[in-house]
C-alpha cells in the first residue's frame, strides 16, 4: 500500500509508492531532497499495534454507549454539502499515462517525479527524459541531464534546442554509443534532420568515440555523390557531447520489415536491385586511397523508403580506412563486427575490402530467404538448395545463390575481387566463370591472377608485398618477386 510521509523540513504530507523506502525524492512544496527511511514503511495488517478499522471510528467517551458516540443523521448531508477540495497537478502520469493517486509526487508505475510547477502538467507537450539504463528505466523531469534514480546520463527530451538551431522532436533509437533523434533545423526552413548524439560517461573513452564520430562525418562527406548515402549537414562538438546532423531518412530498416512479416523473403528482383545499389557504395569506398571498409553491412543498416523500392544505407560509424602505409595495412584493427555477417579475417581484426563482399553476400541471402546467415552453415544450406530438385528456388534465380555462395568463401581469394564485379553479374543475372585474356584472347578461369597462356596480368594490383615492397595481382598466394606468403 502507498506510504504517507511528511517532509523532514516543512512537514508537508505526501503519498509515495509502496517501494519508496531507501529511494530519493523531492518535496513538492519546499523542494528539499530527502531519502525515505525504513520507519516510513506501512505497518502490516497483522501488526496488532495498528487497528485500521478503529482509526475510521469516532472516539467513544468512558461510560457512554456506542450509539451515543454515533454522529447525528444529518452529519452525512452536512459533509456532502461541503465543496470538494481542488486537486492540483496532473491526473495521469506525463511519462507513462498511468493514473496517479491524489496527492502523489511520483508515479507508482514508472517512478516519474512530479513537480508542482505547471511545466510538468499533463498535456503541456514537454516530454520526460526516460533513463536508458535497462535496470532502471525511470522517467525524469525535462531538463535533467542525469537520472535522479541511478545517475545515468539521459537523452534529450522533446523540445530541447541543440546549438541554438536544432530542435529535438522525438527519440528514434538508443544504443551503446548514444541516441538518434528526429529534429527540426530551425535555420533551414524547418527541414527534418536526424541527429546522432554521442553519450559518453567515461572520460577515458570520450576521445575514442569522438574519433569515430569525426571519421563517420568524413566518410559520409566523401560519399556525398552516391545517391543511397545520407547527406551529412553538421558536426557539433560541445564539451563532453558531440552531435552528427544527418539527412533524415523516412522509412524502415529491412530487418524490421522482415521481422514484421514473419521473416518472409523479399522478391528476388528487389534483392538484386538493392544489391546493385549497395555495390555502388562499396566500390566507391574501396576505391579510396587508402581504401575504406564498412565493416557492418547488414539488413539493419539498409533503410527501405516509403516508396517501397528505394533504399538508403545508414550507420557508417564503424567504417575505417586500412592505413596509409604497409605497416598500418598489416596491423590488426579494432575487432568490430556483427556475428553471422563477418568473415574470419575481420573477426581476427584484419578486415579488407573483400570482407565487405562477404557481408554483402550474407545480407542478400537473408533478404532473399528470410533466414539469418551462419557462415559455413549457410554455404551448406545453399548447396542443398541448389542440388534439391524440389527446392523453392526458381531456376531463373539459382545464379543469385551461386554468386552468394562464392562470396561466402572463407578464403578471400576465392571470393569476387571487387564490388564492381558483383554489380556486373547482378546486372547480367549470371555468375561469370571465364574471362578472355586482353592480350592473347585465351579463356581463363575468373579470378586467376595471370593468363595461363601468355602470363598477362588479369586482376587488379594488390598493395605492395610486406617483405619486398613490390606489387602483385589479386589472387596471388605468394609474391612473384620474393616468394613471401601473401594474405
Image: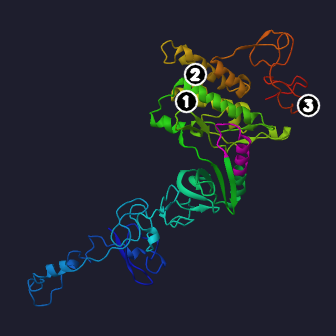
Residue at the (70%, 44%) spot, across then down: 220
Instruction: Look at discs 1 and 2 and give the one toward the viewer.
Output: 1
Q: Mark 3 or 2 closer to N-term?
A: 2
SS state under label 3: loop
Q: Mark 3 or 1 closer to N-term?
A: 1
Residues in magenta?
213-231
Q: Residues within 10 Å of mark 2 (few under 14, many from 20)?
A: few
Residue 437: image location, x then y, percent: 81, 13
Is residue 214 part of the magenta span, yes or no?
yes
Residue 408: image location, x then y, percent: 64, 26
- Real-space Cα separation, disc 3 to disc 1, in angstroms: 42 Å
Residue of label 1: 366
Residue at the (64%, 31%) spot, across then down: 277
Is residue 161 part of the magenta span, yes or no?
no
Q: Which mark is residue 380?
A: 2
Q: Is residue 58 left or right of residue 264?
A: left
- Real-space Cα separation, disc 1 to disc 2, in angstroms: 15 Å
Residue at the (47%, 29%) spot, across then down: 264
SS state under label 2: helix
- Real-space Cα separation, disc 3 to disc 2, in angstroms: 39 Å
Residue 404: image location, x then y, percent: 62, 24
Q: Nearer the viewer, residue 71 or 52?
A: 71
Which quadrant of the view contains residue 352?
Answer: top right
Number of numbered tags placed on the structure image: 3
Q: Residues within 10 Å of mark 3 (few under 14, many from 20)?
A: few
* Image: 225 above or below 271: below
Residue 265: image location, x then y, percent: 50, 28
Specify how the rendered protein is coloured: rainbow
Q: Nearer the viewer, residue 453 or 43?
A: 453
- Residue 7 in sight from this viewpoint: yes
Residue of label 3: 468
Amino acid at each position: 500500500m502507498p506510504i504517507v510521509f511528511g517532509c523532514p523540513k516543512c512537514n508537508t504530507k505526501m503519498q509515495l509508492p509502496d517501494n519508496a523506502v531507501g529511494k530519493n525524492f523531492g518535496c513538492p512544496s519546499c523542494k528539499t531532497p530527502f531519502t525515505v527511511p525504513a520507519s516510513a514503511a506501512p505497518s502490516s495488517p497483522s501488526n496488532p499495534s495498528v487497528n485500521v478499522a478503529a482509526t475510521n471510528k469516532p472516539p467513544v467517551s468512558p461510560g457512554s454507549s456506542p450509539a451515543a458516540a454515533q454522529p447525528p443523521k444529518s452529519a452525512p448531508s452536512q459533509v456532502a454539502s461541503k465543496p470538494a477540495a481542488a486537486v492540483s497537478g496532473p491526473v495521469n502520469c506525463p511519462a507513462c499515462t498511468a493514473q496517479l493517486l491524489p496527492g502523489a509526487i511520483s508515479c507508482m508505475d514508472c517512478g516519474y517525479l512530479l513537480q508542482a510547477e505547471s511545466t510538468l502538467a499533463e498535456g503541456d507537450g514537454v516530454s520526460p527524459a526516460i533513463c536508458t539504463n535497462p535496470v532502471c528505466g525511470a522517467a525524469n523531469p525535462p531538463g535533467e541531464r542525469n537520472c535522479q534514480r541511478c545517475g545515468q546520463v539521459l537523452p534529450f527530451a522533446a523540445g530541447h534546442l541543440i546549438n541554438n538551431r536544432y530542435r529535438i522532436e522525438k527519440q528514434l533509437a538508443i544504443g551503446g554509443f548514444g541516441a538518434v533523434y528526429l529534429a527540426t533545423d530551425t535555420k533551414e526552413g524547418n527541414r527534418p534532420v536526424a541527429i546522432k548524439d554521442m553519450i559518453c560517461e567515461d572520460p577515458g573513452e570520450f576521445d575514442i568515440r569522438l574519433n569515430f564520430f569525426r571519421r563517420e562525418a568524413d566518410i559520409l562527406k566523401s560519399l556525398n555523390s552516391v545517391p543511397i548515402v545520407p547527406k551529412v549537414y553538421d558536426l557539433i562538438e560541445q564539451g563532453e557531447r558531440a552531435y552528427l546532423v544527418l539527412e533524415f531518412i523516412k522509412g524502415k530498416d529491412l530487418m524490421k520489415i522482415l521481422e514484421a512479416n514473419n521473416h518472409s523473403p523479399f522478391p528476388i528482383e528487389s534483392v538484386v536491385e538493392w544489391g546493385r545499389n549497395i555495390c555502388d557504395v562499396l566500390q566507391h569506398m574501396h576505391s579510396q586511397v587508402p581504401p575504406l571498409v564498412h565493416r557492418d553491412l547488414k539488413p539493419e543498416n539498409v533503410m527501405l523508403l516509403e516508396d517501397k523500392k528505394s533504399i538508403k544505407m545508414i550507420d557508417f560509424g564503424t567504417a575505417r580506412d586500412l592505413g596509409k602505409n604497409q605497416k598500418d595495412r598489416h596491423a590488426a584493427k579494432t575487432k568490430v563486427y556483427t556475428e553471422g555477417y563477418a568473415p574470419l579475417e575481420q573477426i581476427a581484426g584484419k578486415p579488407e575490402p573483400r570482407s565487405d563482399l562477404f557481408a554483402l553476400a550474407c545480407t542478400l541471402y537473408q533478404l532473399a530467404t528470410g533466414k539469418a546467415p551462419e557462415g559455413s552453415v549457410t554455404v551448406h544450406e545453399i548447396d542443398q538448395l541448389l542440388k534439391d530438385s524440389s527446392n523453392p528456388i526458381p531456376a531463373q534465380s539459382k545464379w543469385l545463390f551461386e554468386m552468394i555462395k562464392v562470396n561466402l568463401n572463407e578464403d578471400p581469394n576465392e571470393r569476387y575481387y571487387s564490388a564492381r564485379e558483383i554489380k556486373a553479374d547482378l546486372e547480367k543475372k549470371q555468375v561469370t566463370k571465364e574471362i578472355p585474356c586482353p592480350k592473347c584472347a585465351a579463356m581463363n578461369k575468373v579470378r586467376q591472377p595471370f593468363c595461363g597462356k601468355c602470363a598477362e596480368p588479369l586482376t587488379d594490383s594488390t598493395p605492395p608485398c610486406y617483405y619486398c615492397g613490390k606489387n602483385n595481382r589479386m589472387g596471388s598466394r605468394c609474391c612473384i618477386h620474393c616468394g613471401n606468403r601473401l594474405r
